[in-house]
Image (cartoon, grey):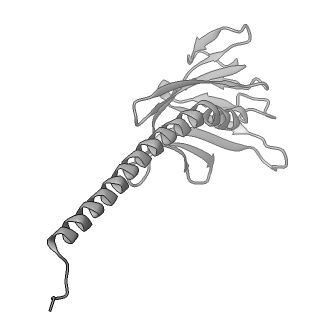
Amino acid sequence: MTRPGFTLIEVLIALAIGSLVLGLAASTSVATRRVQTVLDERATATARATAVPQLLAWAIGRTGRGHDGCAATVGDHGSIWSGTAVDPGDAAPTTVEVLAGVDGGGRPALYHRTLPWARQPWLEDVTSFTVLEGRDADGAWRAWTADGATRWSAVRAELSWTDGEVRTYEVALPHRPCAVAP
């Protein structure tokens, strides 16, 4: 009479097959994570190269449109862009601000704010925003000075990201708003 159960050889074979299956699953998981990291990095690079300039052009570019006076200011050390925007269909001009800051949890972000409403995180992981210079009527790039107002055809803004990347973006201002330094 034989007793029910498994022999030592059967147990060892089952353990070998189980180890092989677990090893294959682990290597697949590691490979998937590597591919996902590469795809995330490519998506981030693409967004920074294409979407960010479009967002900045929308926010900065709308300031001064439809406004006769000097509609934009650049904050201390270029750290903020503030401007008056008159959008089609609006009854009154609004003030638009673009600045870098941290949220309540301490996470850095680029903010877009239409006064008097609260600022809204716009782009995550932005540690600094600096408006570097503007292109004047002669086509020359000039740093911001407090010596008077100039009609700018473009501005250059620099964004720093939490991963250490620093990018400079050129934003065209076809309506040539007047901007001054503080």
- Residue nearest the viewer, comparing 12 with 168: 12
Q: Position of residue 99 (x, y in %)?
A: 53, 38
Q: In the figure, 137 relative to 40: above or below? A: above
Residue at left offset 69%, top offset 13%: 136
Residue at left offset 71%, top offset 35%: 63
Tell me if I can see residue 88 in this picture. Answer: yes
Q: In this view, which residue lies farthest toward the bottom?
A: 1
Residue at left offset 26%, top offset 67%: 14
* Image quarter of residue 43: top right
Left or right of 68 in this view: 113:
left
Tell me if I can see residue 125 in this picture. Answer: no
Q: In this view, which residue lies farthest toward the front?
A: 1
Q: Position of residue 45 (x, y in %)?
A: 54, 33
Circle count: 0
- Residue nearest the viewer, comparing 110 with 68: 110
Q: In the figure, 41 relative to 140: above or below? A: below
Specify the quadrant that holds the C terminus.
top right
Residue at left offset 58%, top offset 34%: 46
Q: Position of residue 88 (x, y in %)?
A: 84, 44
Q: In the figure, 34 relative to 138: above or below? A: below
